[in-house]
Image: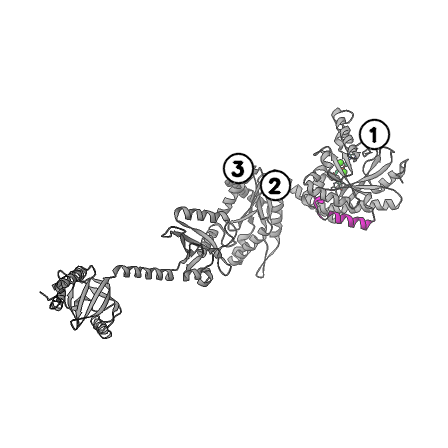
Amino acid sequence: MAKNVLDTLERPQASAGDEGHVYFRTLFDCSPDPVWIIDGSRFIDCNMAAVRMLGYASRDEFLFTHPSDLSPPCQPDGTLSYDKAERLIAEVRSGGSTLRFEWLHKRADGSLFPAEVTLCPIQLDGRQLIYCTWRDISERKQAESDLTLAASVFHASREGIMVTDAAGLIQSVNPAFTDITGFTAEDAVGASPRLLKSDHHDPAFYEGMWRELMQRGSWQGEVWNRRKSGEVYLQWTTISAIPHPSGGHARFVAIFTDVTDLRRKDDQIKHQAYHDALTGLPNRLLLADRLQHAITVADRDDTPLALLFLDLDRFKLINDSLGHEVGDRLLREVSRRIADNLRKSDTVARLGGDEFVVLLPGQDMQDAAQVAEKIIAVLARPFDLDGQRVRTATSIGIALYPRDGGDAATLMRQADAAMYRAKAEGDGGFSFVDPDLNSRAALRLEQEAALHRAVENGEFELFYQPKVLLSSGAPCGAEALIRWRSPEGLIAPDQFIPLAEETGLIVPIGAWVLEEACRQTMIWRRQGLDIEVAVNLSPRQFRDEALPERLAAILAETGLPGSALELELTESTVMGNPTKAAAMLHRIRALGVAVSVDDFGTGYSSLAYLKKFPINAVKIDRSFIADMTQDADDDAIVQMIIALAQSLRLKVVAEGVEQQHQQGALQAMGCDMVQGYLHSRPLPADQFRAWLESRPSHPKE
Ligand code: C2E
Ligand code: CA
Ligand code: CA
């Protein structure tokens, strides 16, 4: 049995020694902390805690173990355990002070564990010994290495990591955060995470995020953020709440990756799936989608819808003779020309080869014919393909929804068939599914072209119809009424004004009428005829913001005083947008020009409403006058209009007065003026002047 150092060294003297000795021996043995005594480089004593800690069966077994067996050959820093132990012991001995260090131990079973060792020099009976205690620090070491691992993950992670503190400010960020956002740790730490905010999300988005974070402790999703450079990017983000150990506010960790490129590729793939690679136009798939949608909208809103099927004539010939590259270039140029001539809401798709489809939501037969005509014209212009001049013609088939088919497939089939019929006619052109429409469309296109020519050639004339004062029987003015002297003869305005209005040609036509009426009236006035002129104004002219300026310019140019001009507007023109109309009327009246409401009684017929507008007169529609004295209702209406107009201090003109008895009745009702065949039909300027001069009572002075 090994001799215990405490037994041998302390026994001799000490009177109370025996008791004290036993006391300390017990303390030594029972201490839960392992203790050894080292003499020189040998272990000469230890307690049971040390024996247990190192996994030996008994104290003797432990004390007989060679010290080199208590450690692995090397320590974690690479030094030999034996050398290092010698050095440390020597240091304690020579320095006489306590030394604390970490040591890697080996248990009896060969397993290793880290310990914190304290060596303390003691003098015992003139011998210098070392008192040594140690602690197993496996757990602490584990925690430390966990921390180190966490830190290196934080630093090495390719995902951006941002931690916010309880106050909601950024506490730390990792290098990947800087790589992705461009903000350095100095920029970010202490700042609010709003630093990264883009304006791509509404407040509701962030509210939802917070709600989920608070309820579930985490949130995942895509967020559009902004880099330091200002660029907006998409990040896939996971935010986790880390509750504070002592309650209180949580901290948050956001881990994110930049998925902008991924998304872009995704979008690209989607784009490729729905577009034609050569021209970039929507392909058959996207067209099917749009067509289905357009049909749904047409049904819901009860609006028209047209589908054009296009095919280039002789494309195969061009492709075969000039090569595919020229063919491809031609197709690209064709796509561009078609697209340039469509509205935003229209779709042009390429089905493949030289087949294109144009979808025109909200457009009827007439619109479709116009678009087809325009496309045929732009594609008829020669193509310059790298020095090669190429010409092609286009055949178009037009299907209308719902008359030519109730579903997408039928519409496509029908338009395709119509295209073949157009092609059979040869040399480009279009054909409706319903052949009856072809002649109607052709007629209209013809009329439109003719009207264009009429504007260019100045084929219009003004006729004048007198207005007569009922009080004196004297003519007081004239209404200018347009006529079209076309190659086929004189055409009445009802035949072309609606078309002019639709096509916008009314703007140049209307401007001419105003100028011509003012010019002619000024000539008469210079000749001593005190005459005023009334000009009809179309809705489109009235909507033109520049109308007052244009009027002022015409008055200045012709010399006609504003008070000698009156504009006739229908109720619907004024009531379309009452606020705007009132403003426009005030601007017109400021020029001294009078305004009357034409065809009164056929529209809204709200005199009370008209009170709000600065107008001078109403013209009772001739449909009421025609049946007067035969239809008691019409009689009553006319009487009421006159009475109301008088109470609003508006002048009243009756139109279409053909019979003496009509005039008599109107006179009895207090009507101010009449206009109609009874006095004169509308006459060309020279005849109007002759009519005026033939009157027994000359126009007023
Ligand atoms: P409106 O302004 O109501 O013009 C009166 C129309 O009634 C004229 O037809 C005139 O010829 C006709 N008329 C006059 N007296 C009688 C009559 O006793 N019996 C019958 N049955 N009819 C009579 P017109 O000249 O064919 O003009 C038709 C419409 O065309 C005009 O109706 C006016 O709305 C429009 N219009 C005429 N000239 C112009 C113009 O220069 N610009 C615009 N925007 N519209 C015009
Ligand atoms: Ca009129
Ligand atoms: Ca009228």
- Disc 3 residue type (three-letter): Gly
The residue at the far front in this view is 15
Q: What stretch is highlighted in magenta?
A: 536-560
Residue to which mark 2 is pinned: 365
Check disc 1: other Cα within 10 Å, few if <14, some if 14-19, many if 20+. Answer: some
319 or 685, nearer to the observer: 685
CB contact under 8 Å: marks 2 and 3: no
State the SS at label 1. Answer: helix
Say which quarter of the image contains residue 7.
Answer: bottom left
Instruction: Give the residue at x 75% y 33%.
Output: 621
The secondary structure making up most of the magenta span is: helix
Tag nearer the camera, 2 or 1: 1
State the SS at label 2. Answer: helix
Instruction: Give the residue at x 85% y 46%.
Output: 523
Q: In this view, does 637 lie to the left or right of 422?
A: right
In the image, residue 673 above or below residue 271:
above
